[in-house]
Image (cartoon, rainbow, N blue to C red):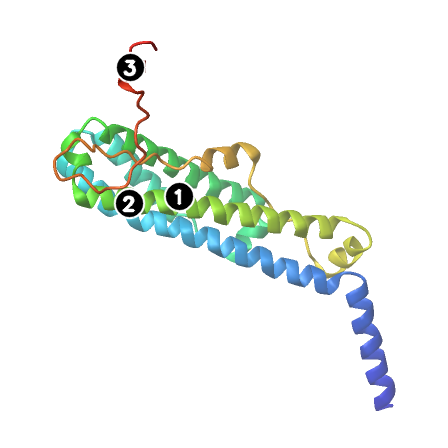
């Protein structure tokens, strides 16, 4: 009797493996891990904002509209509870991503305003925050791309035959993904621009402006 039970369990295990159950489980965990990394990087960006706002405020307190916009956008993101259930709720997923998109746009506006304040751009603390923010935006892009790929693979498995039958039986559902427009928006990190003409700014890393040789500059 015991031998028969073991045989039935073994047959059931082989059957579940053959119909895609194990693959669904593996891919589901992969999606969750990829999403956790996206959230971690978003949180990293959020943690930088208070210091960034305070630093800008010290040189450009009159830019209240922009400063308030960043603060309010950050608060809106923080008001959304991010739990694993987000991946099963397309509406909440889109709401969260819309809030993150608004925060990204507000940060770009803030960095654009700083171009008008040379003293702020030469502040070492501001430079460090800019550099950290740019690095975080790049990490967000990488994490999002990994999530996109993980969800694509998972959703294909959920939809294709015969694994779709197993998915339906065990409650595996298609997960929401980033939209193309949203992906284009996040793929362009804020530009870090340093005023290298400021005394003491030598040695900082920045994208040098293209310059033509003296004898060619007048011909363009």
Q: Is residue 115 visible?
A: yes
Task: Pick out the residue farthest to the left.
Answer: 199
Dot 3: within a 10 Å radius of its alpha carbon, few (fewer than 14), some, or many (20 or more) residues? Answer: few
In the rendering, which numbered label is found on residue 137?
1
On screen, residue 113 versus residue 80, left or right, reads left
Q: Nearer the viewer, mark 2 or mark 3?
A: 3
Task: Pick out the residue farthest to the front.
Answer: 215
Which secondary structure, mark 1? helix
Q: Earlier in the sequence, mark 2 or mark 1?
A: 2
Which residue is rendered at x = 87% and y = 85% of the image? Answer: 4
Residue 157 in percent (x, y) is at 72, 52
Q: Nearer the viewer, residue 3 or 131?
A: 131
Dot 2: within a 10 Å radius of its alpha carbon, few (fewer than 14), some, or many (20 or more) residues? Answer: some
Quadrant including the N terminus:
bottom right
The reply to whether discs 2 and 3 touch (Cβ–Cβ < 8 Å) is no
In the rendering, which numbered label is found on residue 18?
none
Residue 158 in percent (x, y) is at 72, 52
Which residue is rendered at x = 58% and y = 55% of the image? Answer: 31
Quadrant including the C terminus:
top left
Residue wearing tag 3 = 215
The reply to whether discs 3 and 1 touch (Cβ–Cβ < 8 Å) is no
Which residue is rendered at x = 30% and y = 34% of the image? Answer: 69
Residue wearing tag 2 = 49
Q: Nearer the viewer, mark 3 or mark 1?
A: 3
Q: Nearer the viewer, residue 78 or 27?
A: 27
Please say if 75 is above or below 37: above
């Amino acid at each position: 009797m015991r031998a028969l039970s073991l045989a039935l369990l073994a047959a059931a295990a082989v059957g579940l493996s053959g119909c895609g159950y194990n693959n669904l489980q593996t891919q589901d965990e992969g999606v969750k891990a990829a999403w956790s990394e996206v959230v971690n990087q978003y949180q990293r960006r959020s943690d930088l904002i208070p210091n960034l706002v305070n630093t800008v405020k010290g040189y450009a307190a009159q830019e209240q509209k922009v400063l308030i916009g960043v603060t309010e956008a950050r608060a809106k993101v923080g008001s959304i509870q991010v739990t694993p259930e987000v991946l099963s709720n397309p509406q909440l997923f889109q709401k969260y991503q819309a809030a993150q998109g608004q925060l990204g746009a507000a940060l770009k506006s803030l960095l654009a305003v700083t171009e008008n304040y040379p003293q702020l751009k030469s502040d070492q603390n501001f430079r460090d925050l800019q550099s950290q923010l740019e690095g975080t935006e790049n990490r967000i892009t990488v994490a999002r791309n990994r999530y996109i790929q993980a969800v694509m693979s998972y959703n294909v498995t959920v939809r294709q035959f015969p694994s779709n039958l197993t998915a339906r039986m065990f409650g595996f559902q298609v997960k929401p993904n980033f939209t193309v427009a949203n992906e284009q928006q996040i793929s362009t990190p804020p530009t870090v621009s340093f005023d290298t003409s400021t005394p003491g700014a030598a040695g900082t890393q920045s994208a040098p402006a293209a310059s033509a040789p003296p004898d060619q500059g007048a011909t363009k």
